[in-house]
Amino acid sequence: MKKLLAICFSCMLVPAAALAETRCGWLVNPTPRNWTLIDAQNEWLIMLQGGYEAKGMDKIKDMAEGEHVTINYSHGYACFCMNVSTDKDGSVRQIYSTRQLPLSKCRHDPALSEPR
């Protein structure tokens, strides 16, 4: 019985995982509670101060732990890959995992322009 329950539970998780996509680019946090991910296809809204917030924000590691560019005191941007689900309106609906990359990875990608 326990095995059957485990199988049923894992089947319920499949749709969420199937909707996930990996997006890599500039993770930008210019001011408190404002976050976007800029990849080759779009600028994806992750959080807007006083408004929208994607589920799973706690999955974003402190970008100061890796290579990053500081702007506006303790805010800035870094190169990240994120496993997320998105909406057609250009927002990240849920963050499943993140991985910080060296700045050179985004800087050498011809499809990306470095944030200013």
Image (cartoon, helix red, strand yellow):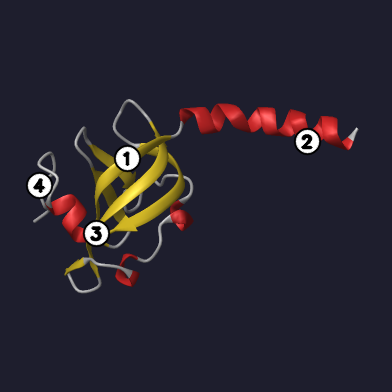
Q: Position of residue 111 (x, y in %)?
A: 12, 39
- Relative placement, left or right, of 107 versus 16 is left
Sequence-first tag of 2 and 3: 2
| Mark 4 and mark 3: Cα distance apart in space | 12 Å
**Image location of residue 108, percent across then percent down:** 12, 50
When the figure is inspected, residue 6 is found, relative to residue 56, above or below; the finding is above
Q: Quadrant of residue 2?
A: top right
Q: Amino acid at mark 4?
A: Ser
**Disc 4 target residue:** 113
Query: Which amino acid does the dot numbered 3 rest on?
Result: Ala
Q: Which residue is mark 2?
A: 6
Specify few, some or many for label 2: CA neighbours under 10 Å numbering under 14, 14-19, or 20 or more: few
Instruction: Decide which of 101, 63 is in the foreground and name it.
Output: 101
Mark 3 or 1, nearer chain start = 1
- Residue drawn where x is 35% and y is 52% of the image: 50
- State the image coordinates of residue 69 (x, y, percent, origin top left): 18, 66
Which label belongs to residue 78?
A: 3
Q: Residue furthest right?
A: 1
Q: Label 2, label 3: how many angstroms apart (C-alpha)?
A: 38 Å
- Which secondary structure, mark 4? loop
CB atoms of marks 2 and 3 within 8 Å: no
Indicate the quadrant containing the C terminus: top left, top right, bottom left or bottom right.
bottom left
Q: Residue at x 84, y 34 (%)?
A: 3
Q: Where is the N terminus found, in terms of image quarters?
A: top right
Q: Amino acid at mark 2?
A: Ala
Which residue, given by chain and number where applicable, does mark 1 sit on?
A: 23
